[in-house]
Amino acid sequence: MFPVIVEGKGKIVIGDNATLSKRSKLLCGQSGKIDIKENFFIAPGACLTVSPNGEFIGGSNIEISENSRLIVSGKWTIGDRVYIANSANIFARERITDQPSLSIGSNTYIGDNALLDLTDSISIGSNVALGAFCIIYTHDHKYEKEKPAPWKGAMKKAPITIEDGAWIGSRVTILPGVTIGEKSIIAAGAVVTKDVEPYTLVGGVPAKIIKHL
């Protein structure tokens, strides 16, 4: 078994001092592009897949930790010193015909077992901390009585924005269309169903204002 799998008909460019660990994978489809600056690290069992015509544009000192799975269907732009912890899953959770984007600013941390649903676009600013087991969901389903189950209704989706310096506690769920304001704090376990103002602490199910910071 080869220690690293790199394959596909797309273009892969990686800067100096990269570490591609045993059992890691870089897969790049037709007309796809992976372009990452220096000091890139991908850990054992991690997989970065770029679908045809997709783009992964990365800064320096990006780390993708063990067993994380990233599937790029649109254009992703990742800043410097972004850390994606163990077993994170970042991809569209539904079949899509368009190519939603993902942007992550510099010095941002994505926690263990985080799930980012890219059925629609997600924008995450710089200096953001996303705790372990967080869920960011950009799609939902309309409730239709004639359907055999609620989750089989027509899909609806909306983008999510997390602004600079926000701190998202562990096991937080953020639902479609929400904007998390600059330097706000989301308490662990909260379910965020509507926009959060900058410099605000919110918590609970559904999340409500606890105090202004």
Image (cartoon, rainbow, N blue to C red):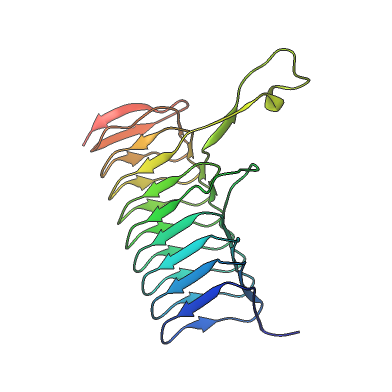
Looking at the picture, how far across and down is residue 106, in whole percent?
Answer: 32, 62
Left or right side of 80 for 12: right
Quadrant location of the C terminus in the rendered image: top left
Looking at the picture, how far across and down is residue 196, in whole percent?
Answer: 32, 32
Front-most of residues 184 and 99: 99
Q: Is residue 9 above or below residue 55?
A: below
Q: Residue furthest top?
A: 145
Looking at the picture, how far across and down is residue 165, in whole percent?
Answer: 28, 50
Identified at 38% across, 56% down, the residue is 104
Q: Number of numbered discs present?
A: 0
Front-most of residues 71 and 11: 11
Identified at 43% across, 29% down, the residue is 204
Location of residue 142 (image quadrant): top right
Quadrant location of the N terminus in the rendered image: bottom right
Front-most of residues 133 and 122: 122
Left or right side of 191 for 95: right
